[in-house]
Image (cartoon, grey):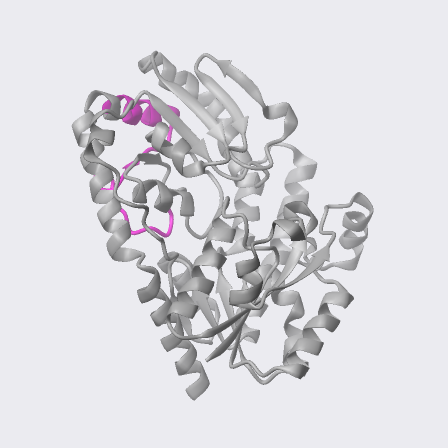
Amino acid sequence: MKVLMLYNRIPYPLHDGGALAVNSMARGLQEAGCELHLFCINASRSFVPPAEIPAELFTRFHLRTFDVDTRLRPLAAAWNLLEGSAYHVSRFFQPAVANALAALLSAERFDVIQLEATFMGVYLPTIRKHSQAKVVLRAHNVDYRIWERLAEGCRQPLKKWYLRLQAARLRQFEEALYQQTDGCLAISPTDASHIAAISQKPVQTVGMGISLPPNTPETHFQDADWQRCLFLGSLDWQPNQEAVQWLKNELWPAIKKQSPQSSCLVAGKNCPDNWLQPAVDGFEIVGFVPDAQATMQQNPLFLVPMRSGSGIRIKILEALSLRLAVVSTRMGAEGLDVTHGQQLLLAETAQEFADAVRWLQQHPQEAAAMGRRGQAWVRSSFNRLQLSQTAVAFYQQLLAS
């Protein structure tokens, strides 16, 4: 089976959930026997210099890349208010990219063309004009929900109005895309249920395949410093920015009051320059770290104070795969079939976060046991090859219809 995946960025480096999800799917589909091709926008916001893209992506996945300036521009945004499209989506369309895609589809035959996330849906008319392939939307999130939730939490009236407007337009585009594609792969059961209630097309849940790290010696967890907390995520993504602000302004003072010896590190790529700060009362924002896994192992109490977003938090899966102790809001754990007290702890308020952190610090053996249960759950539920075989079976169903 020959599969073409379209993505609105380069799935490298593997420093964020989107890149991890696309890279994992590509490798899993190839392991399941597919011939895999990648067609990717090299977006300005996440631009990867061509010389830094691993040669393997070109040789193994026939990678084709196209530079596109996707920066938010005031004049373009103002025109969009009159023009009426979803600005979050329309800025990814470029005629040159559409022409290159048309040329590729005219030269090669694909069985399945997969849109990785909503934003590449702008190229669906080009695909339909030049290919008979089945088109699948892989929904990383229900994207409009992210903007709805950001609008709910926004206190600036004008910005709140704009976020609501763009959320409504994105919802219209996204729900139409559910109907216009031949089927949808959702990354979580929660999103699959939502999409199935709207679309008449087939919907299948295929989660994020995780490649488990090598076994860490048990002595590492026996000696873990549970006073060290961590938030890790892309710091240019608005839901993560919202989470960090809440963590800094409300959660951390409550945690420090109950656990004075605690420290918290905030790390992630594309950190705003004015956010970087040395440790103040144990709270430090360092921005990008070159080895995320090492940083996670050094700071084993993982905080996920998300209040908006959709899909699943892949960083939770990474943290659990490393046997970290995780404290998350229910929003942060949305889409994951986890149980409070088994794989992680759930908290909704500053006091609940403080209580959870203190409990884990006072019960290190239970914290380590929860990490073991979390890793076992990831191992059984997010096997990359098994998930990819589920996707291939879904493709075969579409091709037979």
In the drawing, does residue 14 fall left or right of residue 274?
left
- Is 354 magenta? The answer is yes
Among all residues in the image, which is located at the extreme bottom? 400
> Which quadrant of the figure has residue 392?
bottom left
Question: Is residue 246 placed above or below 399 in the rendered structure?
Answer: above
Camera-nearest residue between 247 and 321: 321
> Residue 386: image x %, image y %?
31, 66
- Is 347 magenta? The answer is yes
Question: Is residue 331 placed above or below 181 in the rendered structure?
Answer: above
Q: Which stretch is magenta?
A: 333-359
Q: Residue at x 29, y 22 (%)?
A: 225
In the drawing, does residue 66 fall left or right of residue 210?
right
Question: Is residue 123 placed above or below 258 in the rendered structure?
Answer: below
> Which quadrant of the figure has residue 264?
top left
In the drawing, does residue 382 fall left or right of residue 153?
left
> Residue 306: image x %, image y %?
45, 38
Q: Residue at x 57, y 68 (%)?
A: 62
> Residue 221: image x %, image y %?
23, 31
In the drawing, does residue 29 fall left or right of residue 105?
left
In the rendered image, the quadrant that contains the C terminus is: bottom left
Q: Residue at x 65, y 59 (%)?
A: 41
